[in-house]
């Protein structure tokens, strides 16, 4: 059972526990969480067992119904029947020799577990070690981490030290922690013995990643979405008075906030989806977009459902000028534009619109705002009516240097309870670069933070004109904004 536990704050957490009901196999590779892949060594005698948690490792315990029909709270772990060796598995037996630090011969068969990390961070793994057996954490090249780089804590909270042979004097049920590098694989095993493993908690580095947010770091099952369900986070009260869990995930150099209401199964903020259908029929289809993939056919994309809780995209590190992002409409929005939203009469007609407002939050707490129409039927000429049907680049540089960005959606369609148009849009490659070959840049209106518009030859404009505009911001900086 993979749980992406992404707690809000400077760092993000991910946790993986073995399911009491699932079957695991020799050599199985598990995309265990957003930034960690778990590989189970080919042992030939893999077994799943359980034991009662202590104080320190209680976070690894699960409550479930056992084979006798009784509810129990225990830690579920895997172990094997073969010592780790550097040869291949021969039926149910390991071949080759045992690990030697000087030889750097990582195991190829027997009982071992490999944790591969996409980002840098702190890894805490739950393990069981036999006394008097050498325990190692090695990198992909066979180099063993020094005992000084490992922290072992018992269920009672006592820190123990391994001796010069990497051995514990007593049998050890507890946690081992170490710093993991980005793009590295770590082998956990006991030379001449069988290690047991019961999951991990991985905390990404506070510096986070870098580059654009493509959302490809998040591991999703086929045709599914992440919306904050089942993760740990901060419990807050939303604007309706409901208790919701506030969590976050990172992609590239940015952090994305999600609010999840377990009582109603609802969410707001940022979800991540890989659903490919462009059809909308029921509420369950809310994670689809009108293109069917992410930008340039990528698998993952963000589905954004902003609320009055102002869920934000945070810049990890110092404030920066964000280049832009690709956006498109959700499948639900397109259905509302072309068929109707079910609460106001029919499809969009002349005079209707749906608008995305993008607010940049600056270090001095001032704000600047841009607007882009997701659908624009305001023109009397029906030939000018449109909604965004493909991935469309939106230039955000006119916001200036920002520490975070949040979004608001408004529409011409409203009733006594508020907006009836679905309040969604989809996003990809946040902070990336536009594909200049398309020549597409959706119209943007600088609503706040801009003071004056000019043509390229310096003539002052009363309002933005089609083409490239020079915009002088209220803070004195100058930006280029394309209006098409």
Image: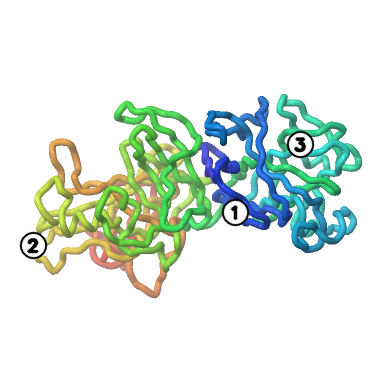
Name the residue carrying label 2. Answer: 380
Q: Residues within 10 Å of mark 3 (few under 14, many from 20)?
A: some
Eye-nearest disc, 2 or 3: 3
Distance (Cα) linking label 1 and label 2: 56 Å
Q: From where the camera sits, is residue 285 visible?
A: yes
From the viewer's side, name the closer residue of 407 and 127: 127
Name the residue carrying label 1. Answer: 30
Q: From where the camera sits, is residue 324 visible?
A: no
Distance (Cα) linking label 3 and label 1: 25 Å
Name the residue carrying label 3. Answer: 151
Residue at the far bottom in the pictured view:
437
Residue at the far front in the pictured view:
68
**Callout 3: SS:** strand
Q: Residue, x 35% and y 52% (percent of image)?
A: 287
Q: Residue, x 20% and y 63% (percent of image)?
A: 386
Asked if residue 235 lies left or right of residue 128, the reply is left
**Callout 2: SS:** loop
From the viewer's side, name the closer residue of 75 and 370: 75
């Amino acid at each position: 059972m993979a749980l992406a536990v992404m707690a809000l704050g400077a760092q993000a957490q991910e946790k993986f526990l073995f399911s009491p009901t699932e079957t695991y196999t020799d050599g199985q590779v598990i995309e265990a969480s957003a930034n960690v892949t778990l590989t189970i060594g080919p042992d030939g005698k893999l077994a799943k067992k359980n034991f009662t948690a202590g104080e320190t490792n209680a976070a690894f315990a699960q409550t479930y119904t056992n084979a006798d029909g009784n509810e129990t709270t225990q830690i579920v772990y895997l172990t094997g029947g073969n010592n780790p060796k550097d040869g291949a598995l021969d039926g149910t037996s390991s071949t080759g020799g045992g690990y030697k630090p000087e030889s750097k011969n990582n195991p190829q068969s027997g009982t071992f577990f490999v944790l591969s990390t996409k980002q840098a961070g702190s890894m805490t793994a739950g393990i069981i070690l036999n006394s008097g057996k050498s325990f190692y954490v090695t990198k992909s090249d066979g180099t063993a981490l020094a005992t000084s780089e490992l922290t072992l804590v018992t269920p009672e909270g006592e820190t123990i030290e391994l001796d010069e042979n990497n051995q514990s004097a007593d049998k050890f049920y507890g946690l081992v922690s170490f710093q993991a590098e980005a793009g590295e694989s770590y082998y956990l095993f006991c030379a001449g013995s069988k290690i047991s493993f019961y999951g991990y908690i991985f905390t990404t580095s506070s510096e986070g990643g870098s580059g654009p947010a493509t959302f490809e770091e998040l591991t999703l099952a086929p045709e599914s979405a992440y919306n904050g369900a089942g993760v740990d986070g901060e419990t807050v009260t939303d604007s309706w008075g409901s208790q919701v869990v506030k969590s976050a995930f990172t992609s590239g150099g940015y952090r994305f906030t999600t609010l999840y209401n377990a009582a109603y199964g609802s969410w707001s903020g940022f979800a991540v989806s890989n659903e490919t259908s462009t059809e909308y029929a029921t509420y369950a289809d809310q994670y689809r977009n009108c293109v069917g993939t992410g930008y340039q056919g990528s698998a993952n994309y963000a589905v954004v459902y902003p609320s009055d809780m102002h869920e934000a995209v945070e810049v990890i590190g110092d404030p920066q000028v964000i280049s832009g992002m690709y956006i498109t409409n959700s499948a639900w929005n397109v259905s509302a534009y072309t068929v109707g939203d079910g609460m106001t009469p029919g499809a969009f007609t002349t005079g209707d619109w749906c608008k995305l407002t993008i607010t940049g939050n600056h270090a001095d707490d001032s704000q600047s705002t841009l607007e882009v129409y997701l659908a624009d039927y305001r023109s009397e000429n029906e030939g000018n009516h449109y909604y965004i049907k493909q991935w469309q680049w939106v230039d955000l540089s006119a916001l200036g240097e920002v520490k975070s960005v949040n979004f608001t959606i408004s529409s011409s369609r409203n009733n006594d309870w508020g907006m009836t148009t679905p309040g969604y849009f989809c996003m990809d490659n946040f902070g990336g670069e536009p594909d200049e070959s398309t020549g597409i840049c959706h119209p943007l209106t600088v609503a706040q933070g801009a003071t004056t518009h000019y043509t390229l030859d310096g003539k002052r404009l009363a309002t933005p004109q089609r083409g490239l505009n020079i915009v002088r911001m209220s803070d004195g900086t100058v930006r280029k904004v394309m209006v098409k």
